[in-house]
């Protein structure tokens, strides 16, 4: 009798716990939908053609856009890519070929650790290495910080994508008499190209959303500037400044910029998933 | 290793030599980078370290005008907000991870996983924007008065409802670290061999008892995931800066404004005028660097040791 009751209790407990797990998954999903809802709602009603084409207006004046910030973000990401992509891809190639040496293990470990270092700390480092010697805030310092942030993600995706390429590809190239470096560069790397490319896009999307390391490196600029040795505007720093401002028009533009960022991030993420799933 | 593979001996080629060392050089750059980061921050924070010594982390005063700097309010704010966020998110994360790896059908599992990854990809500044215009006003007008009425006798829920304060920061941090803890825990639970579940089922265990078996096998990995989430929370800057109220004080109340190490850097770094002020801020960055470095290193080692244990079987 008690055995039966006991097993009934156990079954009920199992049901209840299952329900709790389902509920927690629902709770985790809720903020995503709320945030997407607000960004879409506020963003779509605030976005306009002038957002992309016009310069910011002085405080209090209605209208204007973020053309300089779009250009600035573009330049900063370009600079970051110049650092992040070569270091990331080549060290990814190195790690994918070398598995068990102490050196490669510690590099893999440091890449993981670098990935976890707060971006604001990387901003401080860029400040020390570039802003202090140059004695002024600059696009260069901002790009440097973004570049460091991009390295771990690119290294890791490159390594993983290269590992997915069947070893027979390399062997076939070697059998035809190609030296190893040619086999790696012209046979193995192109076979993994799609995955690596979307990995790079992913790191670019992440860099595009970074604010903290730009606050005291690129600083921000209300005017049109494409000079690398001068402060430069960026979308995210504009969102930060505009969200704190007491002008409703600026708040609306902050939401518009947030919508642009979310669209970029979502598109890149979904395409990365679509492509890598196909390859695996 | 190169030069010998698959039983064939290659003649060393000059191109191979160059290419191999080129890739090794770039990998070495990562090592140099992490080393340089630590080195430069130590050198730049020396004036502050020499002047304040240990009192830097025990003193509550933060007075830029008199150049008297103590980081305790920031350290307290960082640890308090991160730990609370970790406590809330760990239960939700484990529940969700169990749902994803043990309960959900494949199609639902895939959809939910994609959505959770999107949650992880949303830029911090967007969370901050959401915090300023939606979360903080909601907390101020509805949640905090309600909590204050009912639980006001606890020090945690005592005081005037500002909206911008510790509670907003904790909630935003919770949302932000949920995805990383969830997805790593899910991966670890998946790596537990099927045989363990089958054995438990064969002994007559209920679904939940099987989950408990899996959880106990995965527990050290989940601990690693929690540490990684904690590391993320400690370093989170923009979203927290925008909602925490930025007041250097130590208060147990969740309603009061507070400050964190990352947000004081975000707010004051570009305005620091004297050398000692900058140096003190860089020392805060150094402390944050060391804290997250140790956490991430430990977490990685734990996660790796668990996944390796099961992938070898």
Image (tube, coloured by chain):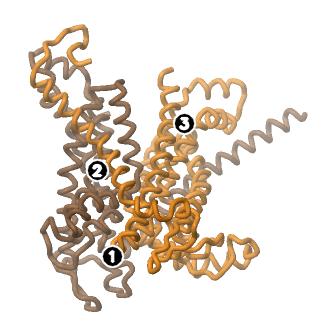
Chain colours: A brown, B orange
**Are discs 2 and 3 located on one and the same chain?**
no
Label 1 and label 3: CA atoms lie apart by: 40 Å
Name the quadrant of the C terminus of chain A. Answer: top left
What whole-number distance in Å separates the C-alpha atoms at marks 1 and 2? 25 Å
Which element type, helix, strand or loop, lies under badge 1? Answer: helix
Q: Residue drawn at (19%, 28%), measured in percent from left and top?
A: B20
Percent coordinates x, y for residue B279 in the rendering: 39, 65
Q: Residues within 10 Å of mark 1 (few under 14, many from 20)?
A: many
Q: Which residue is mark 3?
A: B189
Mark carried by residue A254 = 1
Query: Crowdedness of circle 2 by 10 Å Cα count: few (<14), some, many (20+)?
Result: many
Cα–Cα span, label 2 and label 3: 29 Å
Question: Under tag 3, what secondary structure?
Answer: helix
Judging from the image, mark 3 belongs to the subunit labelled B
CB atoms of marks 1 and 3 within 8 Å: no
- The residue shown at (52%, 76%) is B247
For residue A251, side relative to residue B135 (left or right)? left
Residue B81 in the image, given as x and y percentages of width and height: 56, 63
* Circles 1 and 2 on the same subunit: yes
The residue depicted at 19 percent of the width and 22 percent of the height is A170
Extreme residue in the front direction: B50
Residue position for label 2: A150
**Pointers 1 and 3 within a single chain:** no
- Left/right of residue A20 with respect to residue B48 in the rendered view: right
């Amino acid at each position: 009798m008690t055995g039966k009751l006991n097993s009934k209790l156990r079954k009920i407990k199992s049901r209840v716990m299952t329900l709790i797990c389902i509920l927690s998954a629902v709770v985790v999903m809720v903020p995503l939908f709320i945030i997407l809802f607000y960004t879409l709602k506020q963003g779509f009603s605030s976005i306009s053609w002038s957002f992309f084409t016009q310069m910011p207006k002085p405080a209090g004046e209605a209208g204007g856009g973020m053309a300089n910030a779009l250009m600035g973000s573009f330049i900063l990401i370009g600079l970051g890519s110049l650092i992040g992509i070569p270091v990331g891809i080549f060290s990814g190639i190195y790690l994918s070929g070398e598995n068990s040496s102490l050196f490669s293990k510690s590099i893999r470990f440091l890449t993981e650790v670098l990935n976890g270092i707060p971006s604001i700390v990387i901003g401080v480092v860029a400040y020390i290495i570039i802003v202090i010697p140059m004695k002024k805030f600059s696009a260069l310092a901002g790009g440097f910080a973004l570049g460091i942030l991009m390295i771990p993600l690119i290294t890791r995706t490159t390594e993983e994508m290269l590992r997915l390429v069947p070893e027979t590809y390399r062997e076939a190239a070697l059998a035809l008499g190609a030296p190893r470096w040619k086999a790696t560069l012209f046979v193995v790397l192109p076979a993994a190209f799609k995955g690596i490319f979307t990995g790079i896009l992913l790191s670019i999307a992440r860099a595009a959303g970074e604010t903290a390391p730009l606050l005291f490196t690129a600083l921000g600029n209300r005017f049109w500037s494409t000079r690398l040795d001068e402060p430069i505007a960026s979308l995210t720093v504009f969102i930060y400044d505009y969200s704190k401002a007491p002008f409703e028009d600026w708040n609306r533009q902050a939401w518009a910029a947030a919508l642009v960022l979310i669209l970029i991030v979502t598109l890149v993420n979904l395409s990365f998933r679509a492509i890598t799933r196909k390859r695996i | 290793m190169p030069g010998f593979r698959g039983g064939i001996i290659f003649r060393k080629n000059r191109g191979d030599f160059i290419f191999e060392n080129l890739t090794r050089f770039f990998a070495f750059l990562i090592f140099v980078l992490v080393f340089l980061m630590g080195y430069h921050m130590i050198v730049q924070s020396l004036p502050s370290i020499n002047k304040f010594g240990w009192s830097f982390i025990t003193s509550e005063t933060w007075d830029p005008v008199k150049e008297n700097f103590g980081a305790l309010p920031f350290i307290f704010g960082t640890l308090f907000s991160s730990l609370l966020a970790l406590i809330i998110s760990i239960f939700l994360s484990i529940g969700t991870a169990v749902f994803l790896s043990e309960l959900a059908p494949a199609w639902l599992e895939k959809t939910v996983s994609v959505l959770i990854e999107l949650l992880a990809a949303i830029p911090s500044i967007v969370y901050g924007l959401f915090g300023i215009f939606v979360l903080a006003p909601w907390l101020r007008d509805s949640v905090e008065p309600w909590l204050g009425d009912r639980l006001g006798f606890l020090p945690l829920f005592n005081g005037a409802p500002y909206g911008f304060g510790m509670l907003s920061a904790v909630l935003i941090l919770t949302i932000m670290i949920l995805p990383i803890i969830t997805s790593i825990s899910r991966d670890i639970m998946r790596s537990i061999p099927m045989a363990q579940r089958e054995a438990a089922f064969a002994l007559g265990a209920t679904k939940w008892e099987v989950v408990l078996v899996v959880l106990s096998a995965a527990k050290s990995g989940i601990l690693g995931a929690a540490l990684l989430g904690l590391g993320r929370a400690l370093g989170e800057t923009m979203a927290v800066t925008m909602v925490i109220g930025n007041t250097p004080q130590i208060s147990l109340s969740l309603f009061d404004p507070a400050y964190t190490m990352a947000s004081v850097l975000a707010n004051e770094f570009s305005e620091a005028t004297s050398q000692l002020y900058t140096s003190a801020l860089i020392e805060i960055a150094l402390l944050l660097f060391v804290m997250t470095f140790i956490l991430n290193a430990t977490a990685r080692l734990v996660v790796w040791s668990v996944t390796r244990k099961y992938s070898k079987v």
